[in-house]
Image (spheres, rainbow, N blue to C red):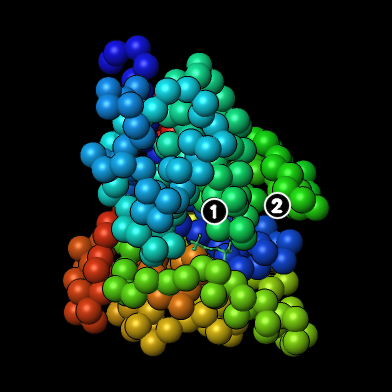
Amino acid sequence: MEKGETTVSAPGKFILFGEHAVVYGEPALALAINLRIIVNARISKNGYFSVNGQSLDRNRNRFIKKAIELYWDGPPLELISTSEIPNASGLGSSAAVTTATVAALLNLRGITSEKEIAESAYEVEYEVQKYGSPTDTSTSSHGGGILLTREPAENELWNIRHGDQDWHINHIDVPELTIVIGHSGFGSSSAKQIAKVHRFVESNSFAREVIRDIGSLTRSGIGYLRDGNKQRIGELMNRNHNMLAILGINTVELQHLVDAVLPFSYGAKLTGAGGGGCIIALTDKPEEASMAIKRVGGKPIIVKSSTQGVIFH
Ligand code: PMV
């Protein structure tokens, strides 16, 4: 590769346990998946910034544009990005494009620190979205599995401060698991779902109890994940799904997908913000689970956990 050129990739993710509860101080456990976004960046010959052959656009390239604003003061760049991660589905595509872009920009400046990439990627994501935890960007940077907590925990990788928030990002050992993702075909707005849960939690002590229960469940999931105890992980996934349904973010389509895969799975749940997007199923029968998803109108994707974070190619 020429000087002034770099190619970087970063993975998507799914949340195994703890989405939404993490917004209220509970832990969350997220795993990187072997679907990636690749970004190639090089000094532009045309004298302006471009992405995939078109000039950098405020609406189309919100994350890339913000990354450049915050972390690049060199000459214009030409970026090419290719993605295997479906958009707006809770699989971390925004975080992966942000992480890969930030890693490319930092690498062109001679910086390859995982911590710096994760911190900077979170800054970009936050600046664009104005909400959310660093779960996605940290998982995309580090790969494997991460546990996000509000207090220092074992195997801390780094902590990220933002305003009065303090997040601890901890490494989790993850065995290779086969997960079938079922895409409902509906996009989901994380901001809307977060606001919906917020209204419920503010006004209802039962909702606050559910949030705490999700926290305990996530904590018990750590050991099962480390031991690769699929039976137990599956049981917790089912329970976590039901709790998320109580919080009001399940949909008819997501429930159809969960019901369809359960006969072929250890467990299944919606993943991410909900209200659309995807379910995940832990299974040893990915083909059967995929067929079941198709039968109820969903789009299956078979993925593996235990994948690398940022890779400099
Ligand atoms: O849309 P996703 O997959 O990034 O999930 C959002 C997860 C929440 O817990 C609802 C919010 C967050 O930033 O952690």
Residue 283 visible (yes or no): no
Q: Position of residue 122 (x, y in %)?
A: 58, 45
Q: Position of residue 268 (x, y in %)?
A: 42, 71
Instruction: Assess disc 1: are there few (<14), some (14-19) or many (≥20) residues with their C-alpha within 10 Å of its C-alpha.
Output: some
Query: In which image quadrant can residue 24 be found?
Result: bottom right
Circle 1: residue type: Val
Element under disc 1: helix
Q: Nearer the viewer, mark 1 or mark 2?
A: 1
Q: Viewer-proximal residue, 312 or 26?
A: 312
Q: Along the horizontal axis of the image, is 218 left or right of 313? A: right
What residue does disc 1 label?
128
Circle 2: residue type: Thr
Q: Along the horizontal axis of the image, is 297 left or right of 160? A: left
Instruction: Assess disc 2: are there few (<14), some (14-19) or many (≥20) residues with their C-alpha within 10 Å of its C-alpha.
Output: many
For the C terminus, the quadrant is top left
The residue located at (34%, 22%) in the rendering is 43
Question: In the rendered image of this protein, does residue 27 appear above or below residue 109?
Answer: below
Whether tag 1 and tag 2 are in contact, CB under 8 A, the answer is no
Q: Along the horizontal axis of the image, is 313 left or right of 118? A: left
What residue does disc 2 label?
149
Residue 260 visible (yes or no): yes
CA–CA distance in space, label 1 to label 2: 23 Å
